[in-house]
Image (tube, rainbow, N blue to C red):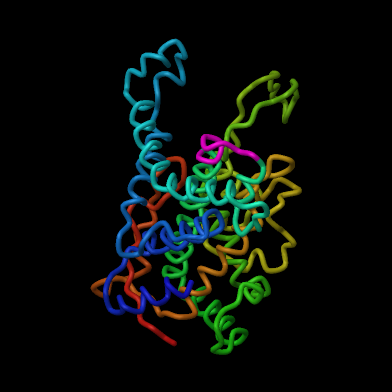
C-alpha cells in the first residue's frame, strides 16, 4: 500500500489509469505471499497485459467447447495461444522455484516463509506448483482490481456517499497510517464494498457448477450432471429483493445483517456453501484496505474538469465484469 500511495503521489495532477495501479498492487501482494518477491512494477506492467490476454482467451467463445470432437483440431487456435501465454507466464517464476528447490535440497531444516516453501515441503512438482500459482493469480488479481475500479467510479458519481466515507475515515483513522485491523471496523466503507459487489460482481455468472443429483427448483427440474451457471449479476439487481435495485445505495447494508457467506442466497459475490470462493478471507481484507487508502490519502477528480455524474458506467463482459472504458482519474494528495 505504501508503494501504491507513493506512486500516486508522484502522479499528482496527472490522469492515471487506476485499474492498472491497483492491478500491480494486488499482483505484488499475492506474489509476496507466494514467493516473497514483487513480480510487477508500477512503472512497467508488461505482465499485466500477458495475464489479461490469457483471461480474454479463456473467455472467448470456443467451438471446441460446444463440439468436443474439434478439441484436438483447435480450429480457432485458442488452445495454442493459451499454451504460449502459459509458457511465458511460467517462465517468469521458474527461476524462483529452481533456486528454492536447491535451497531445500541443501538444507536439513527449512523454515517456511511463504507458500512456495509449503509447496516444496509437501513434495509438489514444478507442474503442480505452476498451476497452483497461476490459479491464485488469475482468480485473485483481476477480480479485486475490477471491484476497486467500480467502487471508485460509483463513489465519484455519488458525491454524498463519497463525502460520508471520507468523514468516516477522517474520524476513525485520525491522520494515522491505515491498518488492516482498522478497516474491518469501518461500517460505511464496508457497506460501499458490498454495494459495489452487488451492482458489479466481478464474476457475474460465477464459475460453472454441476448438479450431483436431479433436483427441482421453483418448478424447474435440473437433471443430474447438468452444468449450472448462477447469474449473480441478475440476483444483485432483482427489484423483488432490492429496493431501488439499480441505484448505488451503501446504506442498505448498514443494518441488513447481510455478510459475504450468503446463507440465504440473496447476496452471492463469492458464492456460497462448500464451494464458496476460497479467497474470501483475503479479498474481504484487501478490498476495503485498498479502497480506504485511495480515498483517505487522495481527493479524486476526472480529467479536464469532466462531470462525474456523466461518467460512463457501461461494462464489458468477460471472465470478469470490467468497465468498458478504463477509469482515468486525477489524484490530489491530502496527507
Res. 222 image quadrant: top right
What main secondary structure does the magenta stretch of the protein show?
helix
Residue 129 belongs to the span the image colors magenta: yes
Foreground residue among 54 and 255: 54
Total number of numbered discs in the rendering: 0
Q: Residue at x 73, y 29 (%)?
A: 217
Foreground residue among 319 and 134: 134
Res. 171 image quadrant: bottom right
| 81 lies left or right of 223 | left
Q: Residue at x 48, y 52 (%)?
A: 141
Foreground residue among 283 and 189: 283
Residues rendered magenta in the picture: 123-130
How far from the left and from the top, in percent, is residue 254? 68, 68
Foreground residue among 12 and 251: 12
| 201 lies left or right of 45 | right
92 versus 167 height, above or below: above
Res. 149 image quadrant: bottom left
How far from the left and from the top, in percent, is residue 64? 42, 18
Q: Residue at x 63, y 31 (%)?
A: 209
323 versus 9 height, above or below: above
How far from the left and from the top, in percent, is residue 211? 69, 25
How far from the left and from the top, in percent, is residue 49? 33, 48
136 versus 40 height, above or below: above
| 100 lies left or right of 83 | right
Amino acid at each position: 500500500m505504501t508503494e501504491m500511495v507513493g506512486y500516486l503521489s508522484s502522479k499528482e495532477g496527472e490522469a492515471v489509469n487506476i485499474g492498472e495501479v491497483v492491478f500491480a498492487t494486488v499482483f505484488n501482494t499475492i506474489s509476496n505471499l507466494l514467493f516473497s518477491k514483487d513480480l510487477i512494477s508500477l512503472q512497467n506492467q508488461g505482465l499485466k497485459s500477458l495475464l489479461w490476454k490469457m483471461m480474454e482467451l479463456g473467455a472467448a467463445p470456443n467451438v471446441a467447447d460446444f463440439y468436443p470432437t474439434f478439441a484436438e483440431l483447435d480450429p480457432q487456435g485458442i488452445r495454442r495461444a493459451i499454451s504460449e501465454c502459459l509458457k511465458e507466464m511460467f517462465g517468469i517464476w521458474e527461476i524462483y522455484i529452481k533456486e528454492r528447490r536447491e535451497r531445500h535440497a541443501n538444507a536439513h531444516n527449512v523454515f517456511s516463509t511463504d507458500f512456495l516453501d509449503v509447496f516444496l515441503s509437501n513434495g509438489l512438482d514444478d507442474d503442480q506448483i505452476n498451476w497452483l500459482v497461476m490459479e491464485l493469480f488469475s482468480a485473485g488479481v483481476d477480480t479485486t482490481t475490477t471491484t476497486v475500479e467500480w467502487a471508485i467510479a460509483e463513489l465519484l458519481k455519488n458525491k454524498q456517499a463519497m463525502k460520508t466515507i471520507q468523514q468516516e475515515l477522517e474520524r476513525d483513522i485520525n491522520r494515522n497510517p491505515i491498518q488492516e485491523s482498522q478497516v474491518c471496523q469501518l461500517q460505511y466503507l464496508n457497506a460501499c464494498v458490498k454495494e459495489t459487489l452487488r451492482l458489479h460482481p466481478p464474476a457475474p455468472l460465477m464459475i460453472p457448477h454441476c448438479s450431483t443429483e436431479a433436483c427441482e427448483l421453483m418448478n424447474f427440474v435440473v437433471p443430474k450432471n447438468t452444468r449450472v451457471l448462477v447469474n449473480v449479476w441478475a440476483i444483485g439487481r432483482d427489484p423483488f429483493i432490492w429496493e431501488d435495485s439499480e441505484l448505488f445505495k451503501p446504506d442498505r447494508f448498514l443494518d441488513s445483517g447481510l455478510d459475504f457467506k450468503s446463507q440465504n442466497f440473496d447476496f452471492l459475490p463469492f458464492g456460497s456453501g462448500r464451494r464458496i470462493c476460497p479467497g474470501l478471507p483475503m479479498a474481504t481484507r484487501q478490498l476495503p484496505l485498498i479502497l480506504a487508502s485511495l480515498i483517505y490519502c487522495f481527493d479524486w477528480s476526472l480529467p479536464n474538469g469532466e462531470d462525474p455524474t456523466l461518467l460512463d458506467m457501461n461494462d464489458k463482459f468477460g471472465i470478469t465484469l470490467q468497465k468498458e472504458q478504463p477509469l482515468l482519474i486525477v489524484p490530489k494528495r491530502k496527507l
